[in-house]
Image (spheres, rainbow, N blue to C red):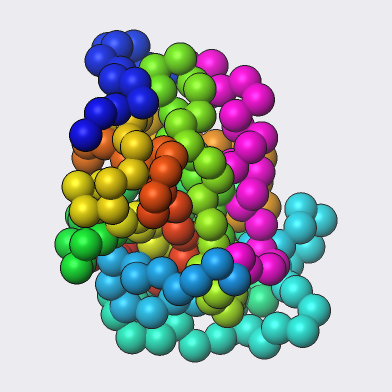
């Protein structure tokens, strides 16, 4: 199985990406879902999304807050000092991103994208993250991820608390997809435009061909593992 390209540069893409930051990354929004099929997230079931940057509390017509977060890895010990409806949305500069512990599945690779509130105020995330694999030069690898058909609800993050969204794809060894090895994953919080760069250390990802789709779930409380 060949790679589309192999990237071994030790240099990180410091200009966070030229046009790529606006490809899959601006896709971080709080409404709508890709009906392209369900996704098996790293753990639990999903809930959580984003709102437009109006400076007002996170809300969306036709939704009820706070919705059920379902079972799984909810951060049950996290104190909520403001309700999800009252807290403003979390901005990129207020968050830290990481890739959590992988959760293997039958022919699947599943990873939690974890956002942590680094401020001293409560804020909310609501919806899907933007996500794009990039090489050392900042060029996007593969198409934009697809979204699972989840129901978004607001996730309230007290200081130091986290929310996670699932990222998954079929194992290339099984699917036969064409692959490349990314240098980083760019993660854009819901309704934000500036991404957070996370080093990718989990090997090759599918970028083209059979079963090459990468899928995302909405945010829910906890760290996903």
Q: Which contiguous range is marked in magenta?
A: 14-34
Judge by depth and name the residue closer to the eye, 218 or 82.
218
Quadrant the C terminus occupies: bottom left
Predominant SS of the magenta segment:
loop
Q: Residue at x 63, y 37 (%)?
A: 23
| Residue at image coords 62%, 20% | 18
Q: Nearer the viewer, residue 56 or 177?
A: 177
> Which image quadrant is residue 204 in?
top left
**Residue at (68% x, 68% y) in the render:** 32
- Image coordinates of residue 5 in percent, x first then y, are 34, 21
Indicate whether 192 appears above or below 72: above
Where does residue 196 sit, x and y in percent of width and height? 48, 36
> In this rendering, would 164 be left or right of 146?
left
Determine whether, in the image, residue 8 is placed left or right of residue 79.
left
Question: Is residue 175 on the magenta stretch?
Answer: no
Q: Is residue 154 above or below residue 3?
A: below
Q: Residue 173: image x %, image y %? A: 19, 47
Regarding residue 182, the answer to whether it shows in the image is yes
List x then y, in percent, for residue 73.
28, 75
Residue at position x 49%, y 88% in the image: 68
């Amino acid at each position: 199985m060949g790679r589309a390209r192999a990237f071994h540069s030790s240099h990180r893409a410091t200009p966070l990406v030229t046009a790529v930051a606006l490809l899959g990354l601006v896709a971080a929004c709080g409404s709508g879902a890709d009906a392209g099929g369900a996704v098996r997230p790293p753990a639990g079931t999903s809930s959580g999304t984003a709102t437009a940057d109006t400076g007002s509390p996170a809300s969306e017509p036709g939704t009820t807050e706070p919705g059920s977060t379902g079972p799984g890895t909810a951060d049950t010990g996290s104190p909520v000092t403001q309700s999800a409806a009252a807290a403003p949305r979390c901005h990129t500069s207020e968050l830290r991103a990481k890739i959590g512990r992988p959760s293997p599945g039958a022919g699947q690779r599943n990873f939690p994208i974890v956002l942590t509130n680094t401020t001293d105020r409560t804020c909310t995330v609501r919806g899907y993250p933007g996500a794009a694999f990039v090489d050392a030069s900042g060029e996007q690898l593969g198409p934009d991820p697809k979204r699972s058909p989840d129901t978004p609800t607001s996730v309230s993050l007290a200081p130091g608390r986290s929310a996670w969204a699932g990222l998954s794809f079929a194992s290339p060894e099984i699917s036969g997809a064409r692959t490349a090895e990314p240098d980083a994953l760019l993660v854009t919080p819901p309704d934000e435009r500036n991404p957070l760069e996370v080093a990718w250390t989990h090997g090759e990802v599918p970028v083209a061909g059979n079963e090459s789709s990468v899928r995302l779930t909405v945010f829910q409380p906890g760290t996903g593992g």
